Image (tube, grey):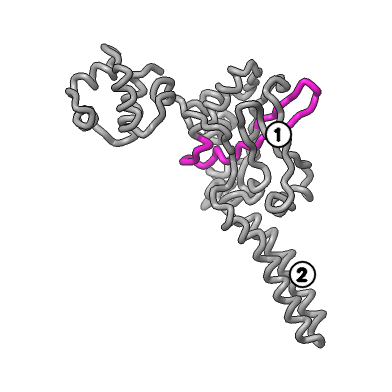
Amino acid sequence: MNIGENIRKFRKVQGMSQAALAEQMYISRQSVSKWENQESLPSIENLIVLSGILEISLDELITGEAYLHFPYMFGKLRHQKIAAGYILLPTFLMLIFFAVAIKYPSQSLVLVLSGIGIQLFLYPLFLIIQPFQLSRMYTYWQLTKTGIRCPIYQETNQFKYLLPIKGLFKRKDQLIPYHEITQILIEAEVFPVDPSIGTGIVNAYTPRMLSIMYEPFQLVLSTKSGNQYKLDLQAYYQADSPEREVLYSILLFLKRKQIVIKDPQQLLITIKQRESITDTLYGLKNN
């Protein structure tokens, strides 16, 4: 994409006409038209002014891709305190029952069992019913200038159940330098049935309405030592998320680091266009 196309693209994102943009820059509408039609190029001074008016970086204006600020956190929940509240509320309620049990010894067994029951029932329920994934308290990863800081965790169902709690108190990660990475595989999976269509029994289903409805989507990172690390990409599923906007730029950055990007499902085009991965895969599957 060239500068003229980028100016047109980001001008429309701001909801501005050529005339409105020209007025803010104190130039003629014809000048803006010539830039967008590739008949001339804006000066460096005008590029700087354009980046300010269009609210983008110079890199983004010139390349058309989102600018990467280091370190970049991919997938980290924006509302950490709210997420922490959902994680800790069942435990808080359980402790209240324990405190009441101490005050009323004759009912202590019932109260203690009730408290434990609330903990065992509410915690997994909160994990399931959230529209966002509490596991992202742990599975987010960080892109730095020297490497990728990957979360370290096991992929057993029992461990995933504890990921939100571990994300609050004991998260482990490891910095993998770029020169140690040999390749990165883009990998996505879909459900046997497209949830947006339904099964004939339940048709009022909204894909990814609950956290358990998220299809797996990840980068599989391989190193020279033979180790593999998985980087969760499910934050991309949110259409207005920063992760969807920046993922293609991240992949371009990694490619410039001489890392082989493998894309057997041909998802790069969809990622570049910031479109739905699942719509693409279900479309291919249904056809």
Name the residue that disc number 2 marks. Answer: 116
Name above or below for residue 103 compared with residue 149.
below
Query: In terms of image quadrants, where is residue 214?
Result: top right
Query: What amino acid is at disc 1?
Result: Lys
Name the residue that disc number 1 marks. Answer: 230
Locate residue 138 relative to residue 35 in the image: left or right: right
Residue 197: where, in percent of width, then height?
53, 43
Residue 74: where, in percent of width, then height?
59, 38
Name above or below for residue 141 compared with residue 89.
above
Locate residue 66 relative to residue 177 in the image: left or right: left
Give me the residue at 33% from left, 25% from top.
48
Residue 202 visible, this angle: no
Q: Secondary structure at mark 2?
A: helix
Of 237 and 41, nearer the camera is 41
N-term mark: 2 or 1:
2
Residue 287: where, in percent of width, then height?
56, 28
Q: Secondary structure at mark 1?
A: strand
Question: Residue extending furthest top?
Answer: 39
Where the N terminus falls, by quadrant? top left
Of 18 and 266, nearer the camera is 18
Residue 256 visible, this angle: yes
Q: Which mark is residue 284?
A: none
Give me the residue at 65% from left, 55% from top.
127
Residue stretch rendered in magenta on the structure: 219-244
Query: What amino acid is at disc 2?
Result: Ile
Query: In terms of image quadrants, where is residue 9?
Result: top left
Label 1 neighbour load within 10 Å: few <14, some 14-19, many 20+: many
